[in-house]
Amino acid sequence: MTKPKIAAAPSIRRLPSYLHIIKQLQREGDDYISGTVIAQELNLEPIQVRKDVALTGITGKPKKGYPISALITAIERFLCWNSIKDAVLVGAGNLGTALIGHREFQIHGLNIVAAFDRNPQKYGTAIHGVTVLPADTMEIQIRSFGVKIAILTVPSPSAQETADVLVRAGIEGIWNFTNVKLKVPDNVVVQKEDLSSGYAMLCVAMNVVREGRNG
Amino acid sequence: MTKPKIAAAPSIRRLPSYLHIIKQLQREGDDYISGTVIAQELNLEPIQVRKDVALTGITGKPKKGYPISALITAIERFLCWNSIKDAVLVGAGNLGTALIGHREFQIHGLNIVAAFDRNPQKYGTAIHGVTVLPADTMEIQIRSFGVKIAILTVPSPSAQETADVLVRAGIEGIWNFTNVKLKVPDNVVVQKEDLSSGYAMLCVAMNVVREGRNG
DNA sequence: TAGATTGTTAATCGATTAACAATC
DNA sequence: TAGATTGTTAATCGATTAACAATC
């Protein structure tokens, strides 16, 4: 089995923002949207939007653009956002709580069925309607749920050991919000979300602007 | 004034993870770290690590690697993480609360001096020691604080109007956690943090693995 | 029709990777 | 010394951008 190639990451990352714009236009009653308009709205080049949109397999109409409802369907299909995907969240702290409450993910088909935590005081409580279960029972519960996606929001020191349990439980994708580079088997996908890297970008960019001003 | 070029974004984004590894090694008592080791730890190419590290201006010793404490200083300087930077947070909801409580940012010099919210019930309360103030007073307060960084965690519909106020208040950098593309003057930096794009990456990658398995 | 927009093919640009001499 | 590692210079790779014919 040759390892299949993942489609261009920058394009995948841009598609959700297209989706956001397009849905907005749909609410305003439009039937078609041109790549030019999307580009304008997001400060991108029209050709880039056309290339990205082409990935989803949809074709547009010269002079009119892309049919909005079909484009939404195509993007959601491409991102696998057209079906409900169950997930568990591990580490019901501040960040975990925020992610459970984040409505946008639900819209994209993410359904958090349970949260796990080590703090007994949280056992049985509900966070935005999601029950917190004991971390000890994680492996067996995930197996019985048949869940394949885990959102990891535990403290960094527990990250790797938690990931090991998740892998044993049959998890296929880990959305990793810790700053730990997880070691997992090849067949398990890890998406690392690094808030610090975004902060680094902000700091450097602000410094560049400042230097530009001061000469 | 020619607009200065921002250093390679992918490199900037990788530096925080280097910093994390290096600090760990320092805690274990090491004095030197080689690019090879950092690369191994993060699943990168050694040459890439050397190139990135070179950006910070530090030089290593053949056979030994880079002096750890000097390397930490160099990276932190490069990212402007060597000084305390005051910031305000706007929108004290779930995500805002999580970010205020995120210790890592403090380590990187981010000091949240106040939070703003529209909910009167929150006025005067403290979130992880940070006082919540009325959103109405935002402009004048930010001016009097002299704060230049704002973390934006308001609901999407309020994002642009809030950004407008921030700009009027003299904010120079906005860390934008909404899914709205903000329109701001050229001299204001916006770093957009898009959690949905990370989720899109996870979904597509999981699908690729699944297709690989099923043929 | 005229003109805006698509989609394709080619060119450019920039980041990653390779090669290798220098060096401790 | 021998060998691991750095730092520089060149090659490769992939993403972005440009050009333009097709078309509604």
Image (tube, coloured by chain):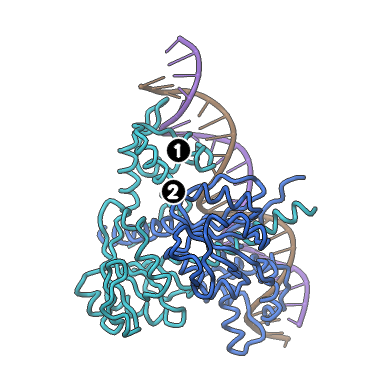
Chain colours: A cyan, B blue, C purple, D brown
- Residue B201: x %, y % from top left: 40, 58
Q: Residues within 10 Å of mark 1 (few under 14, many from 20)?
A: some
Comparing B3 with B166, the one in front is B166
Residue A98 in the image, given as x and y percentages of width and height: 40, 66
When the figure is inspected, residue A44 is found, relative to residue B37, above or below; the finding is above
- Residue for badge 1: A50
> Left or right: where does residue A107 sit relative to residue A15?
left
Q: Residue furthest left?
A: A144
User: Which of these two is toward me, B135 or B162?
Assistant: B135
Task: Determine which residue is flagged by label 2.
Answer: B157
SS type, badge 2: helix
Chain letter of mark 1 equals A
To the question of a shared chain for discs 1 and 2, the answer is no
Q: Taking A164 as reference, is B163 left or right?
A: right
Where disc 1 sits, the SS reads helix
Residue in the foreground of this view, choosing between B199 and A169: B199
CA gap between label 1 and label 2 equals 27 Å
> Which residue shows up at 71% across the image and 47% down it?
B3
Three-letter code for the amino acid on which mark 1 is drawn: Arg
Q: Residue at x 28, y 51 (%)?
A: A82
Instruction: Work out which quarter of the rendered image holds the N terminus of chain B and state it.
Output: top right
